[in-house]
Amino acid sequence: MATLLIKNAEIVTMNRNGDILTGDILIENDRITAIGPDLTPAHVDKVIDAKHRTIIPGFVQTHIHLCQTLFRGKGDDLELMDWLKKRIWPLEARMTRNRSIIPLCSGSVS
């Protein structure tokens, strides 16, 4: 789809003021090209009425423990500090670069 117009949405922005506004979003070739009230582009392939809907920015997970995907279920009955000291930290201490490949792939998929 080349051009998509989302109309009447509550839009949560990531600008410096953290504005939340009501308006339209124009997406052309998978890129947001305009945000504003009552956008009227010359050509649109699809229009979505987002009235009573909220659009939020996509978030990127920047803090993740991929090696821990191998450790799921290990010590779920423990309190946090016991879980870390008795299970996670000892297991992580034995991780090597080569041993990290499997949980990296597994965690990336999940």
Image: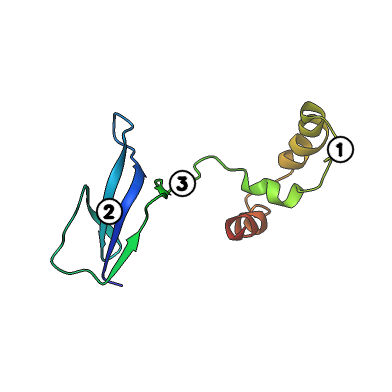
From the viewer's perspective, is the residue at label 3 or at label 2 nearer?
Answer: 2
Specify few, some or many for label 2: CA neighbours under 10 Å numbering under 14, 14-19, or 20 or more: many
Residue 74, percent across and down? 82, 45
* Amino acid type of the residue that numbered disc 1 sits on in the rendered structure: Asp
The residue indicated by pointer 2 is 25
Q: Mark 1 or mark 3, which is nearer the start of the sequence?
A: 3
Label 3: element kind:
loop
Disc 3 versus disc 2: distance between alpha carbons?
A: 21 Å
Amino acid type indicated by mark 2: Ile
Q: Amino acid at mark 3?
A: Val
Q: Position of residue 21 (x, y in %)?
A: 30, 39
Query: As drawn, is 63 to the left or to the right of 57?
Result: right
Q: Residue at x 85, y 34 (%)?
A: 78
Q: Where is the N terminus found, in terms of image quarters?
A: bottom left
Image point (74%, 43%), residue name: 94
Q: Would residue 73 be found to the left or right of residue 5 on screen?
A: right
Classify mark 1: helix, strand or loop. Answer: loop
Circle nearer the N terminus (1, 2):
2
Q: Quadrant of residue 22?
A: top left
Q: In the rendered view of the protein, which quadrant contains the C terminus?
A: bottom right
State the residue position of label 1.
77
Residue 107 location, x and y as percent?
62, 54
Give the distance between the C-alpha atoms of the residues marked 3 and 1, in whole angstroms. 30 Å
What secondary structure is marked by label 2? strand
Q: Which mark is residue 60?
A: 3
Which of the two discs, 1 and 2, sits closer to the camera? 2
What is the residue that sits farthest to the front in this orientation? 52
